Amino acid sequence: MSKKSASVWTSIRFWRRSAAWVTGTATVLLIWLTFDTMGQIGMGSDADLKNGVTKRIPAATVINYHIDYKYDQKRGHEVPVIGEKEDFFGKQWSAQEAAALLHKGKLTEQAKNCMDCHTLLGNGGYYAPDLTKAWLDTKWNDGTMEGITGKSTKEEAMAEFLMHPDKYPTHARMMPDLGITKDEAVALVAFLKHMSAIDTNGFPRNFSQSAKRLAGGTHAH
Amino acid sequence: MLTSAHLKYESQKLAMNYFRVALVLFGAQLLMGLIAAIQFVYPSFLYEIFDFSVARMVHINALVVWMLYAMIGAVYYMLPDETGEEAVAIGLGKLAFWVLTAAVAVVVLVFIFIQVGPGNESTIWFINEGREYLEAPRWADIGIVVVVLIFYWNVFATYMKGRKTGIMTVMVADLFALAGLYLCGMFFTDNISMDQYWWWWVIHLWVEATWEVFVGTLAAYGLIKILGAKREIVEMWLWIEVLMLFGSGILGLGHHYFWIGTPEYWWEIGALFSALEPVPLVAMFVHVLYDWGKEQGHKEATSGAHAVNNTPAMGWIAINAFGNFLGAGIWGFFHTLPQVNIYTHGTQFTAAHGHLAFFGAYATILIGMMYLGVQGAYGIKKMTMTFKSKMAIVLITFGVLGMTVALTIAGYEQVLVERADLGGGWDAYFIAQNLPWMLQAQGWRLAMGIVTFVGFVYLAWDLLTIGAVESKQAENMEGAAAAAAAA
């Protein structure tokens, strides 16, 4: 392996140049794909929602709408479906109010370090349930938690639980009281509702089926 | 590890300081891991005093920080060896070390005693950012950038001044990318998909690209140092590894973009390139064993002696070759394709892979570098394993493998019951967590965590004492040889 190599396969110069070209090409491709992805994952606007334009990540005002998670024949998995208007904490939120609420919700999610127990979009700790579609979870939709917390709407039950999780144990592994205030709890629920409207390419798979499966029992026990 | 007496360069003495702090943080990481593992088995343990979220946060941050300390230490150690020069701004480098250590201490104390803050910007600035692995508050982020710039200046300017070996060229280029990527994780956005997109630029492009190249560079340096491997061969391997690691790892980033709101084309890109990611790990594995066998054969043919002049370091580097391939390669690959990952994403599978990959790919080689440092610091020509070195290798490796197997079983159960059968959700999650397979697996994980911790005690004890013991032995032998010659 002197400077004059017998074969290109044992030439350091050849491998060095190949490494540089491959790395450069991969980096350029990644940057190009990133530009395309940025365009697709930017948050939609309130006008999009009003005109029925589907965005992967809808505007904060999605909290003013009913959200469902339904099987899409063409895509072969479940997708969020944004339906009719519905009140959130008893009112419709303006674009500014909704944006401010989502901002506070995301800040609170980080400040309370939710991700080190829960997973969001499947990332985080594995000590507590995945929150990606928590807003659509059977637990909040079949009246269980409303009954336990004594609240009449899902969002109020969620906010109450977040403020005093230690009062409403559902499992030996309990969520601690993180000193979440009323304002923070409302914002957190808005954040969760917004996240449930994100198009996650069908993750978690068969999520909406869980209600049926659990009602019918499981052979897993 | 308690002396730096035989080191010629200030850069290498500074490296020993980094190794010492790294060892302390490694111990802290394992203690926090034990607390978190206990909480999986006994959920009321330290409830509302030191919750799982806090234990896990310190566990994963101590991991990242001890590795960065050991990496910086390893670079300061090899820098004068490779370039033939003292680090150019060594005074500034020393100052940066103390600033960084003080900052890390403050951050950890805040994590432990204040834990969480109100839902506004002040928490992000002063308590924690609540973003897995990147929890450090923003003031610390900025401080880390300044410290890393000082470190990088030392490496870059020294490289420019001194000998430009292939190993150092790769190191300088790799560190530039590694340091630059940290900036991608330093902003706040309300859009969680955007947040996760850039978060992965730091996490993935660190652990599956720049850190892997870093490991290849250390292995190349280590093989020359320990075995006297031929530089041309080692450097040619290194360039092939860089080609394959960056060629697969950069676009392999796509396997994190399946479910976070990003477009579907990432399915194909992520699947293809992450399936290629194990290939360079095979190459690294072959490379280490090839050089080891070749140099040993040469030595036996000429003098019959042992080629390895530092058996504990060589032991850890050999485990790195296996562990990187097994932990990052095999355990990573089997849940990397989207068809599988839709069920395994965010389950104990990820935890199993994470434990074996961080250990196999990074912890092992960094421990190897610490042994190299001890050898240099005590001026030992041929360092051999003590009983404690062997206990450390056996117990830590067995413990981590045991934790990985336990978590893999837990992962299987979670995938089959929670994901495939019940479709996810709150009740599905807790049904899976309550089944005997999960409970037993978490019990075994805790037991194996304790084994790992005992191994760490041996490791720390060995690193602190092996230098003094072996240099004394060498002195005695020289004394005896001189006496024999005189007689």
Image (spheres, coloured by chain):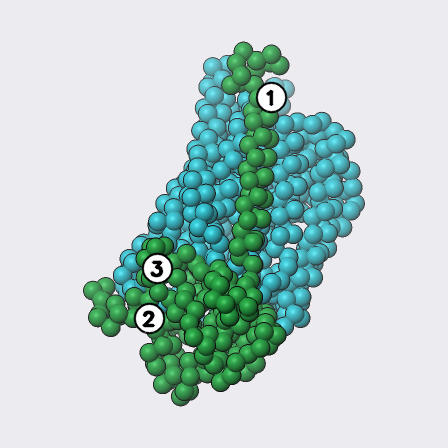
Chain colours: A green, B cyan
Q: Give the residue type at disc 3.
A: Asp
| Amino acid found under the numbered disc labelled 2 | Asp
Which residue shows up at 36% across the image and 85% down it? A147
Pointer 1 residue: A13
Q: Is residue B399 visible?
A: no
Front position among marks 1 and 3? 3
Q: Which mark is residue B427?
A: 2
At which x and y percent is residue B127? 63, 68
Disc 1 to disc 3, how far (Cα)?
53 Å
Q: Nearer the viewer, residue B482 or A77?
A: A77
Position of residue B306 relative to residue B78, above or below, is above
Residue A143's quadrant in the figure?
bottom left
Marks 1 and 2: same chain? no
Local packing at callout 2 (Cα closer than 10 Å; few below 14, some 14-19, many 20+) is: many
- The tally of labels here is 3
The numbered disc on residue B330 is none
Looking at the image, which residue sits at the far front? A51
Q: Quadrant of the N terminus of chain B?
A: top right
Horizontal and vertical percent position of residue B315: 48, 36
Residue found at x 60% / y 26%: A17
Tags 2 and 3 touching, CB below 8 Å: no
What secondary structure is found at the residue carrying circle 2? helix
Amino acid beneath label 1: Arg
Q: Quadrant of the C terminus of chain B?
A: top right
Q: Residue at x 46, y 35 (%)?
A: B281
Which subunit holds the residue at mark 3? A
Q: Position of residue B119 (x, y in %)?
A: 60, 73
**Is the residue A84 above or below the residue A73 in the image?**
below
In the rendered structure, the answer to whether residue B406 lies left or right of residue B207 reads left
User: Residue A18 at what x, y percent from top left?
Assistant: 56, 27
Label 2 marks a residue whose chain is: B
